[in-house]
Amino acid sequence: MQPLANVTPLKPPPRAGAIEVKNVGQIFKTSTQDVVALDSVSLEIKPGRFVVLVGPSGCGKSTLLMMMAGLRQQTTGTITINGAPIPKPDPDRVGVVFQEASLFPWLTAEENVEFPLALRGVAKAERRAKAQEALKLVGLDGFGKRHPHELSGGMKQRVSIARGLVQDPPVLLMDEPFAALDEQTRMTMGDELLRIWSATGKTVVFVTHSLTEAVYLADEVIVMSARPGRIVDHLQVPLPRPRTYEMLSGDAFGTLRDRIWRHIRKSA
Amino acid sequence: MSAKTLRHLIVIGLIALWEILPRTGLIPELFLPSLSSTLRAGWNEAPEYGHALAVTLYEVAISMAIACGGGILLGAIVGSLPRPRVLIMPMVSSLYAVPLVILYPVFTVWLGIGTESKIAFASIYGFLPTMLATAAGIQTIDPQLILAARSMGATMSQRLVRVIIPAAIPTVLSGLRVGGALVIVGVVVSEMLISSAGIGYLISRYRTILDSPHVFAGVLLVLFMAMAFNALIKWIERKAAIWQTGTRAGQSAADDVGSGAVQPAT
């Protein structure tokens, strides 16, 4: 059926962002020598894609993510998000979720989610409503009044995700968000993240050490090598969605994971 | 029986012993006057004790303001800037180990035997731990929290007000707890050494004439003062820093350690 032209849709179309990284290099100067952390990295991420960065420790994947967040500036090259560079953090365009314990322990879950809105002087009632909505999205309806120490590790990460999403940014950057969780919680949170992602249609860039997690979550996996950090492979994950637990033991899954592992073993 | 009831029972038992032991003559009244005679002595000289308490409280209040205000301010500066930290911290830390009471006679030469010398001595005495704790509190803030605030677009002043200060509160409070207790110790000790007014002075004067009930009445007053201070700090901690230790078990453990730590050597 054709939609009527004069009816505005109830939900605005999802805001998704395009990310473009061109010839980005990062050099750390130490007293004795210059360390090349990233060497001429280029990549393009289309709106709405779920992209995972993997690589051995020290390959610069987190550094690259911090640059996309505007938390760090590259030595050379350009990074644009929706066509504009990102010289400093811009929560309207980019939400960031960190590894762990980045919730403010003296605030309740909903106050944590409201934090970025409070920084910009959004009125209390509107703040509260948006926080409620974000908490509901991550499955924490009714837990808003709890402090972080009263929440489990998985719940804390849900709050972090809600905080990253509360301003409805087109891009969500996640720096090893589930690294501190136990295996079971990690699997559940992966499924939860995919559900949230498909509900919001954001562009997600996700850094992880886990190859299984990478293949399970991603549309595309970008493999990086260390010293200097550069991209050694950029592969598509053709597995259908929704992803299921059974896929983990399938041939297609194993082949992809092996291919990534070979790259990492070579560079480590 | 819970630990709390047991603790209460022990306190009640000690109070009862305080009354019974001297009365039965097991301990001479000179060494330990009974609770009732101590209370009676205090009651009979109520105006004198009241005046002394006023003097002591005044000195404590001023010293507390100087020690805690100055300690927090300087601790915040030293804790957040690397250069003063390298210069000052080792000095302050080693100074902390010196029994500062040796300086008190010098203060009386400079400032006389009135309230000024007590305030000066107690202020310095309480200042050091407050400053050290504040500096440590600022230094040990999880950098991840500040990074997260930055990623949400927090400006420098927003980071200070909304992240750094609330994150430092628990450590600063534990510094206040020790610093404030040391201020009370400093005031009372300096009154006992050289002075003409205050509870410490009364205790010291009645001791020289071997009037034990009056000595113990003064001791009781100091005890109540310290307990009131401790209760005040606990109340502030509950209001401001519920999140500090995370769990209830951790909270009560911190209580035990905290109250043990307020008994410093003079």
Image (cartoon, coloured by chain):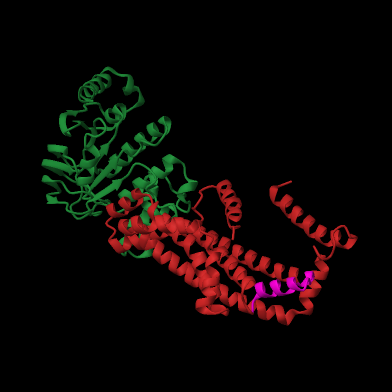
Chain colours: A green, B red
**Magenta part of the protein: which range?**
B197-214
Q: Nearer the viewer, residue B136 or A235?
A: B136
Q: Is residue B210 left or right of residue B132?
A: right
Q: Is residue B241 visible?
A: no
Q: Is residue B70 left or right of residue B251?
A: left
Q: Residue at left 47%, top 51%?
A: A147
Q: Residue at left 56%, top 63%?
A: B182
Q: Residue at left 24%, top 19%?
A: A255
Q: Quadrant of residue A225?
A: top left
Q: Is residue A252 visible?
A: yes
Q: Position of residue B184 (x, y in %)?
A: 59, 67
Q: Nearer the viewer, residue A110 or B29?
A: B29
Residue B187 vs B148, above or below: the answer is below
Q: Position of residue B26 (x, y in %)?
A: 87, 57
Q: Residue at left 15%, top 42%?
A: A27
Residue B207, magenta (yes or no):
yes
Q: Nearer the viewer, residue A140 or A65?
A: A65
Q: Position of residue A156 (x, y in %)?
A: 41, 44
Residue B125, magenta (yes or no):
no
Q: How many marks?
A: 0
Q: Position of residue B76 (x, y in %)?
A: 38, 62
